[in-house]
Image (cartoon, rainbow, N blue to C red):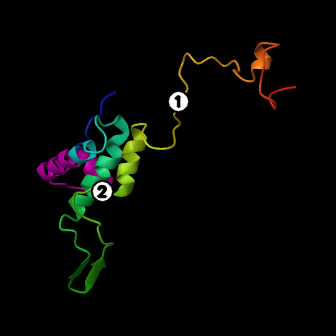
Amino acid sequence: MAFVPPTAEDLALYLGLGEIQGDRADLLIAQAAALAESVVKPLPEQATAVVLSVAGRAYINPQQVTYETIGPQSVQRPAGSGGLYLTKADKAALKSLAGRGGAFTVDPTPAAADPSPTWPAAAFAPGWPYEPGWGS
């Protein structure tokens, strides 16, 4: 099944907001999906979680503010907690969802390789001369 981008309503639910700016949310979702496609194309259908995370981060904190004081209240956010970008974890999740990343092996043996032994010569041709140390 193909990737279906989340909606503005999905983003509102993800962020726990009662109201959301639909046009802005749609733009951020589209941009988040485009960023995700720079890592994996086509996007797997489960990439919705990563796209919502990226768009949500940008929706809540578009200017990447790390410290803010309004009246008697102040808020400190972790550095890099806003704006539209993919984290290392986002990229790893996308690759994992697409079935990429992780360990793999490469077998260099040709498919037509014969598994029978070729040495020592005495093992397959009794009576032939062979080097000392090969067999009995």
Q: Is residue 19 left or right of residue 104?
A: left
Mark 2 vs mark 1, CA separation in Å: 50 Å
Magenta residues (range): 8-33
Q: Label 1 belongs to which residue?
A: 108
Q: Are marks 2 and 1 in contact (CB under 8 Å)?
A: no
Amino acid type at circle 2 is: Leu
Counting residues from the start of the chain, the first of labels 2 and 1 encountered is 2
* Residue located 30% across and 37% down the image: 43
Amino acid type at circle 1 is: Pro
Q: Label 2 belongs to which residue?
A: 15
Query: Residue 97 at x, y = what percent?
Result: 41, 40
Circle 1 residues within 10 Å: few <14, some 14–19, many ≥20: few
Q: Is mark 2 on a helix, strand or loop?
A: helix
Q: Depth check: 50 or 26 in front? A: 50
Instruction: Considering the whole magenta stretch, tell me its main secondary structure.
Output: helix
Q: In this view, does 45 lie to the left or right of 84?
A: right
Query: Residue 29 at x, y = what percent?
Result: 21, 47
* Residue located 25% across and 64% down the image: 82
Let me know if residue 45 is in the magenta part: no
Q: Is residue 134 positioned above or below 100 on the image?
A: above
> Residue farthest to the right?
136
Q: Is mark 1 on a helix, strand or loop?
A: loop
